[in-house]
Image (spheres, grey):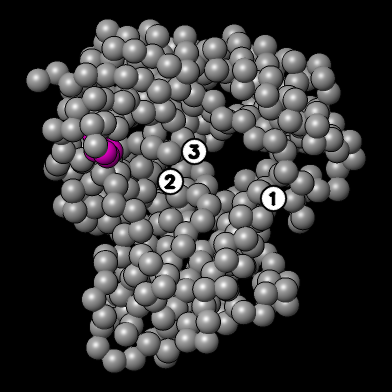
């Protein structure tokens, strides 16, 4: 008696929220069951960022609703629940309780009333047993990107207190985590609401903690990348020389319609500065194709930019028309067919660039983190590979230990992955 199952959908920020909820439930004697069939309460943390994410969330709610039967409760929370709570209740009456974002205490109170008695044996509050961990440093967002509804869901930007972050970082390091990934909707904004404290200082403070671990920074807003931050990444040994800065587009008209800062010339100068200042830096970006009013010429200019800059990593999204967003009512919406064609064209260009970049790594040696060992294959990552979004290094060796650092020599290169051998 006394178990919950929890399915976390969407981004790493949702995963952090889910694991924090499980920790609070565990403090109340409520354990986590990885198998929904073994639980008394089914919980799902939903994503409502883009259309495909909303569809997945609804499909998973319906799937769990069929599992619940008469003796289980179904709780839905998170971004989709915040945006479409009334509609979900109406369309899926099997939902017993529904909350938005940041309602942990209400969920814990609800679960505690249902689950009584001694604590049940269960697994830890971690949903993923990986050598890396996401460390959320802020909540909400002050940016006004016209395609995005996150500020409406999660509110204005709020930095988490440095002491709280450092304490969590120490806990993760002591638990054996070898890579701490700093995340927020916009981590470059960190400290803007604090006194005399900013992201570079936080990074330096985390890097000063004892232990053998990496620090990775995700989602840097390009026009907020300061010289101090660049210097911090370049000089702190524990910080991966990895810049993830979503540009979203390169053309002035589209950037303005998106409510984004920057320009093609600004991005070129910034990237040149980063590559000059940070040794062997790996730069990743994301782009949106098919934004309303994007002309063929503007799209082609962006593709030319991609070919010129040669990003190490690049992700592409097809524009998703979201209710409540500033761009929702824009005229000049682009057909799904054209969006798909543009997506494929950018990815074809990037595929060649990625292979070219990877081939330059053949023969070189790197420190690598072993993420998993399965049968004869070890799956590792070097500093230039973020988990879940970039490629991996495949190693034909099952003698290494998951969660350990090893030195590898790159032997072969593919479009996105690498093959390597361990240096004994």
Q: Is residue 147 left or right of residue 215?
A: right
The disc at residue 51 is 1
Q: Are marks 2 and 3 in contact (CB under 8 Å)?
A: yes
Assign a secondary structure to mark 1: helix
**Residue at image coords 24%, 52%:** 172
Judge whether residue 45 is colored magenta: no
Q: CA distance from mark 2 to mark 1?
A: 23 Å
10 Å neighbourhood of mark 2: few (<14), some, or many (≥20)? many
Q: For the residues carrying marks 1 and 3, which lies nearer the camera in this image?
A: 1
Q: Upstream in the sequence, badge 2 or badge 1?
A: 1
Above or below — where is 294 with respect to 133?
above
User: Is 331 in front, or is 121?
Assistant: 121
Name the quadrant of the N terminus: bottom left
Q: Quadrant of residue 280?
A: top left
Q: CA distance from mark 2 to mark 3?
A: 7 Å
**Residue at image coords 57%, 62%:** 60
**Residue denoted by label 2:** 183
Q: Position of residue 407 (x, y in %)?
A: 18, 22
Magenta: predominant secondary structure element? strand
The disc at residue 219 is 3
Q: Position of residue 25 (x, y in %)?
A: 35, 76
Q: For the residues carrying marks 2 and 1, which lies nearer the camera in this image?
A: 1
């Amino acid at each position: 008696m006394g178990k919950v199952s929890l399915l976390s959908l969407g981004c790493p920020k949702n995963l952090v929220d889910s694991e924090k909820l499980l920790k609070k439930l565990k403090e109340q004697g409520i354990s986590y069951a990885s198998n929904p069939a073994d639980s008394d309460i089914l919980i799902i943390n939903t994503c409502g960022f883009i259309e495909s994410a909303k569809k997945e969330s609804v499909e998973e709610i319906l799937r769990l609703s069929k599992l619940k039967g008469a003796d289980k409760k179904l709780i839905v929370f998170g971004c989709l629940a915040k945006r479409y709570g009334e509609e979900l209740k109406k369309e899926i009456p099997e939902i017993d309780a529904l909350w938005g974002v940041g309602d942990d205490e209400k969920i814990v109170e609800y679960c505690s009333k249902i689950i009584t008695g001694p604590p049940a044996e269960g697994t830890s509050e971690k949903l993923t047993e990986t050598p890396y961990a996401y460390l959320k440093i802020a909540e909400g967002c002050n940016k006004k990107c016209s395609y995005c509804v996150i500020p409406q869901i999660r509110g204005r930007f709020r930095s988490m207190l440095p002491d709280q972050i450092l304490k969590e970082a120490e806990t993760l390091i002591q638990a054996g985590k070898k890579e701490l990934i700093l995340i927020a909707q916009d981590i470059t904004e960190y400290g803007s609401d604090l006194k005399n404290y900013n992201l570079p200082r936080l990074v330096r403070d985390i890097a000063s903690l004892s232990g053998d671990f990496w620090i990775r920074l995700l989602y840097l807003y390009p026009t907020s990348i300061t010289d101090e931050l660049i210097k911090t990444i370049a000089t702190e040994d524990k910080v991966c020389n990895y810049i993830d800065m979503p540009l979203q587009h390169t053309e002035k008209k589209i950037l303005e319609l998106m409510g984004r800062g920057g320009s093609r010339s600004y991005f070129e100068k910034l990237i040149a500065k980063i590559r000059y200042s940070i040794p062997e830096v790996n730069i990743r970006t994301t782009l949106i194709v098919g934004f309303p009013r994007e002309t063929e010429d503007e799209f082609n200019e962006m593709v030319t930019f991609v070919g010129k800059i040669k990003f190490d990593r690049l992700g592409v999204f097809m524009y998703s028309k979201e209710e409540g967003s500033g761009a929702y009512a824009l005229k000049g919406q682009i057909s799904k067919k054209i969006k798909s064609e543009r997506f494929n064209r950018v990815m074809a260009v990037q595929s060649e660039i990625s292979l070219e970049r990877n081939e330059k790594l053949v023969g070189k040696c790197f420190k690598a983190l072993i993420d998993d060992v399965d049968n004869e294959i070890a799956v590792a990552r070097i500093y230039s590979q973020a988990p879940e979004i970039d490629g991996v290094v495949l190693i034909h060796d099952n003698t290494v230990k998951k969660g350990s650092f090893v030195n590898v020599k790159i032997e072969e290169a593919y479009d996105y992955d690498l093959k390597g051998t361990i240096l004994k």
